[in-house]
Image: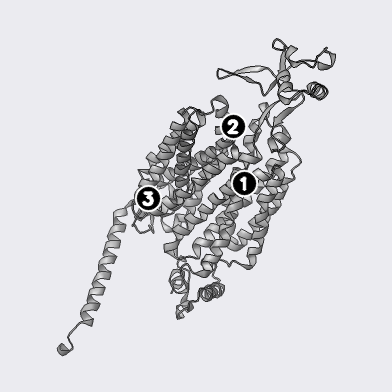
Amino acid sequence: MTSFDDILEEAGNFGRCQKRIFALLCMLSFPFAGVYVGIVFQGFTPDHWCRDSGVVEIRQECGWSLADSRRLTVPLVNNSGVLQQSSCEQYEVDWNSTTLTCDTQELNLSKTPRTACKDGWEYDYEGRQSFVTEFDLVCSDGWLVDMYQATLNVGFLVGSIAVGYLADRFGRKMSFLMSSLFNVIAGILVAVAPNYMSLLVFRTLYGFGVKGGWMAGYVLITEIVGVEFRRTVGIIYQMFFSIGILILPLLAYYITDWRWLQVVITVPYILCLSYYWFIPESPRWLLSQNKRSKAVEITEAMAKENKKTLSKNIETLADDNADSNTASFMDLIRTPKMRKHTFILSFNWFTSAVVYQGLIMRLGILGGNIYVDFLISGLVEFPAALLIIFTIERIGRRIPFACANIVAGASCFITAFIPDSMFWFKTVVACLGRLGITMTFEMVVFVNTELYPTFVRNLGVSVCSTLCDVGGIIAPFLLYRLAAIWLELPLIIFGCLAFLAGGLVLLLPETRGVPLPDTIDDVEFPERVKEKAAQKNQQLADLLLNNDVSTNKDPATD
């Protein structure tokens, strides 16, 4: 019996065919970035104040500026010791029955009764429109903005499980294509939603397809490249998400309406439908479904494109996981070390999602130039992938993983207490936090796969990564509600989570240079794995030594 990995050595571990497929699937990360953090622009809450229809009429007659009408509409309130114009209250004045002069300086309304906004709000948004300004999601309805991101993550949670099952049942390619079609439909429905409740429903459906399709693409590309390329391919696949992060503020700057921005984010999924003719099904999956002839056909086509020639071993190609055990959730928590790994990895998935999304969404409430701030913070994600590739084989997994968490936590704490007057210093420290949490997010994926035995590996990653979506559901409420109390309070919470996650990572074993475990016993008793590897290496050395002796044997002694 010949395994697919053996045949892949002959067909090319990462030849022209795999590079072409990889490049196509990486394009999927561009729109995914827009979906994941698009709320920063689509749900931007600009400076706003109560709209008074009577003041609007007088403003037009007297030629008042927007600032004049705002001063006459809203009172000053004490915000953390600073007097600011209220966003949610207005003076209770009947402008139609009041004798007025156009001289705004003569009008003193400081002792006038106050009331909640009655005629909606006015926004200082320079001709732009977010769904916040369209549906007036401010003041008492401000919490509904949190639901926009929370419902997306609910879709992520359900979709990653459902599409993961469908990918195992009907294939990686078919699941990817069906997800893309679903994304096109749901994305357009989001763009044309008539009211906010329907927008949340469509947003949930959008999340269902987006993450599931992205994961199907991830699985497909890692299954058709050689073992030694899988980790690098996985990291670069995620790095294209960072490129999408850089493209998003440029799109948002030139596309002033959130609905059209949604359409542009959805368009790439239409192009993904054409992948039906350009990407193959995973031969590994075909073998697992006893579709050997189709798997052989695809493998031969890959070899041909890579300009490689296959040996007759292709005739004995078989599924190398055919005899694997059936996994269950209890396998993840039944034994002490498996239980510890599951808890620590789940918490790191949760922390990565909360801190990563929180730091990005925080850019929308800081009051600076949101486009420049977003672009700068996106640039720091690129060194993350390079640092991972450089350190994991030289230093290991555990120390960089823990340090990335600790750097993120320390940066959050320090940023919270740096005064706004030290703007650039505060920006640099915040960017270090973004770098750290990006490294954490990218590392938790492959560390997760290295700590579980073969038969339960996929299930382990699926279960632990669900905490990522739970974190995504909580993140907007944690950020926006706590920021209403104190703008920097969310950073304190993020710092605590990241520090705790970093400390827990130090309790995990180092996996650099350690063979992947095959059984739960390999996890519980890692010294046995090392003994097996040492014995195997010794047997190989003895075999080579015997071959050398036989080769160099003096013919005269025969």
Viewed as shown, does residue 203 lie left or right of 56?
left
Question: How many residues crowd mark 1 within 10 Å: few (<14), some (14–19), many (20+)?
Answer: some
Sequence-wise first label, 3 or 1: 1
Distance of mark 1 from mark 2, alpha carbons? 18 Å
Under mark 3, the amino acid is Arg
Mark 2 — residue?
A: 367
Q: Residue at x 51, y 73 (%)?
A: 306
Mark 2 surroundings: few (<14), some (14-19) or many (≥20) residues within 10 A: few
Q: What residue is shown at x 70% (from left), y 24% (from top)?
A: 67
**In the displayed structure, would residue 508 be above or below residue 28?**
above
Residue 155 locus on image (x, y percent): 62, 46
How far is mark 3 from mark 1, CA to CA? 35 Å
In the rendered image, is residue 330 in sight? no
Identify the residue position indicated by label 1 in the image.
Answer: 250
Q: State if disc 1 and disc 3 touch (CB < 8 Å).
A: no
Q: Secondary structure at mark 1?
A: helix
Front disc: 2 or 3 = 2
Q: Which residue is mark 3?
A: 397
Quarter placement of the N terminus: bottom left
Q: Residue furthest top?
A: 111
- Relative to the observer, which residue lies in front, 477 or 124? 124
Q: Amino acid at mark 1?
A: Leu
Select label 3 or label 1 by which is in front.
1
Q: Residue furthest right?
A: 97
For the residues labelled 2 and 3, the Cα–Cα distance comes to 38 Å
Query: First in sequence: mark 1 or mark 2?
Result: 1
Circle 2/circle 3 CB separation < 8 Å: no
